[in-house]
Image: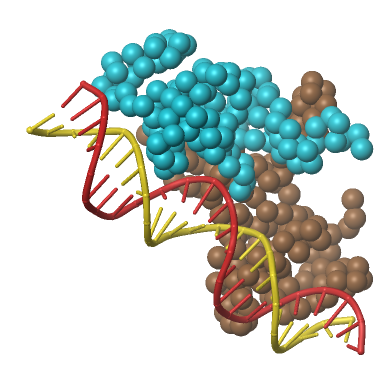
Chain colours: A brown, B cyan, C yellow, D red
Amino acid sequence: MASSPTGIDGILADLRARGERITTARRVVLQVLLDHPDGHLTIDELADQVSEQAPDVHLSTIYRTAEFLEQAGVLVSVRLGASPAVYHFASNAHHHARCENCGAVIELPGNAFDALGRRLLRDHGFRAHPNHVVIPGLCRDCDNS
Amino acid sequence: MASSPTGIDGILADLRARGERITTARRVVLQVLLDHPDGHLTIDELADQVSEQAPDVHLSTIYRTAEFLEQAGVLVSVRLGASPAVYHFASNAHHHARCENCGAVIELPGNAFDALGRRLLRDHGFRAHPNHVVIPGLCRDCDNS
DNA sequence: CTTGATGCAAATGGTTTGCATGTTT
DNA sequence: AAACATGCAAACCATTTGCATCAAG
């Protein structure tokens, strides 16, 4: 696994070294995400935050930038059903469960799917990529009411 | 768990007994699904099939009918990301993995998530409902190329 | 007859795209 | 200057909704 530069300068240098261009949108999107280290930001939330620092960045550019950063391996997107996708750093690897009742997102350890993944590989030859999945269900509080 | 009547008459009788109305759309949707016992039909596929028997049934009615049958516990919908939802009978309980490369849907046994579910409950108090989840990944063929 | 289901058209919401223009390298 | 990213508006696609009408009970 390649080392993941953590500071914004490290990430930018890494992208530049790969021949990618550094633009305002990319810089500010990364900055916003670094300012919300625990956040799972939707495109809209991202756009709101970005517009505080760079009001001229268009929503469609946020989409394109998030997609670019995901392709580049910097970000990970997570989606379930019709709910909007959320993004976080790929280096902060974990899985997600979401309460159907209150909407709370619970972070599951990155190895939560390991056993299932092994079983799918062994029994079905299927190599699971559970990174983008949200498991629906009821959180502790909502389950007890 | 209530007994699941299998024939169309049984299902209809069951719905009627619960005070629900039996309409052409509901009858034909059920018939189509019974005619595709292994299928995971999207709303559009459902609409195509239904229109052969009942051309006047509107697409929005298919949506409403599918939702109704899901609420009634007869059908289950499965969705991932932006892909259209697919429906099958609730009595045919299983989980789904989908190849990101070729789109093949692999049916996983209904207990595939049991271990993960137990772990989520024990460690996080989270009661998983993995019924509507599709695990992305690569199927055997696409993984070997 | 009363309640609920349907047809239709129009709206919605998240996301994508075509194209001319602006920026990075 | 060449390659690429962006702004903008318009398109897209699955799905939902308001409302007048129709059918099931």
Rendered-image quadrant of the C terminus of chain A: top left
Q: Is residue B88 visible?
A: yes
Specify the quadrant of the image occupied by residue A13. bottom right
Q: Is residue A131 above or below residue A70?
A: above
Q: Residue at x 39, y 30 (%)?
A: B25
x, y percent for residue B100: 75, 41
Q: Nearer the viewer, residue B45 or C8?
A: C8
Q: Is residue A142 left or right of residue B17?
A: right
Q: Residue at x 73, y 33 (%)?
A: B104
Q: Nearer the viewer, residue B29 or B145?
A: B29
Q: Is residue A125 above or below residue A21?
A: above
Q: Position of residue B48 (x, y in %)?
A: 53, 35
Which residue occupies 85% across, 36% down? B142
What number of labels is visible? Answer: 0
Q: Is residue A139 left or right of residue A20?
A: left
| Residue A96 on image: x %, y % | 62, 44
Tell whether B86 sits left or right of B25: right
Q: Position of residue B114 (x, y in %)?
A: 62, 23
Q: Evaluate whether residue A143 shows in this view.
A: no
Q: Quadrant of residue A67?
A: bottom right
Q: Nearer the viewer, residue B80 or B122?
A: B80
